[in-house]
Amino acid sequence: MTSFDFEVVSIEDARRELEGEAKQRAEFARNARQVQDPGGVLLEATAAWLASLPDDVRPNRLAAEFPRIANGIGALWTQAARCQEYLDSLTVDPRGGPRGFPFDVDRELSALKAHYAGLRPDDPGVPRRAPARQR
């Protein structure tokens, strides 16, 4: 009979680990609920947001194949922390693996996430607003 090796941990450590996993699942579910829209149709506001992006980071295939997700990103784009969390939840599975998107869509999401993080190098993930015009 083969014996099993176990790592000795305290009950508190085990509880923290379980609570962390539950928190990640709850956060993902919360983000998913917040960006749902009926019908899975690309919204006009999302189309305008897409048009505002540079060509090399515009997620055209995502918008065509997953309009609900594109709508969610567009809706959260100006809410830095929430948008960054949502982009993270789309690109990395809480269990440690990649998400299940087609390769092209995954590549678009990665490029968009990198673009978003670079908008303000001093505060990654925060969209930079255009400076007000001086008159």
Image: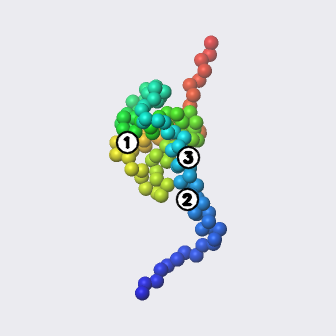
**Where does label 1 land, which residue?**
105
Rendered-image quadrant of the N terminus? bottom left
For the residues labelled 2 and 1, the Cα–Cα distance comes to: 26 Å
How dense is the environment of label 2, judged by Cα within 10 Å: few (below 14), some, or many (20 and up)? few
Residue 46 or residue 13, whichever sits in front? 46
Spot occupied by residue 27 in the image (x, y as percentages of width and height): 56, 49
Does residue 120 show up? no
Indicate how the structure is coloured in the image.
Answer: rainbow
How dense is the environment of label 3, judged by Cα within 10 Å: few (below 14), some, or many (20 and up)? few
In the image, farthest residue toward the front: 38
Q: Earlier in the sequence, mark 3 or mark 1?
A: 3
Asked which secondary structure carries label 2, the reply is helix
Any mark on residue 30, and which? Answer: 3
Rendered-image quadrant of the C terminus? top right
The answer to the question of whether label 2 and label 1 lie on touching residues, with beta carbons closer than 8 A, is no
Q: Earlier in the sequence, mark 3 or mark 2?
A: 2
Please, what is the three-letter code of the amino acid marked with disc 3? Arg
- Judge from the rendering whether residue 85 lies leftward or rightward of residue 55; answer left or right: right
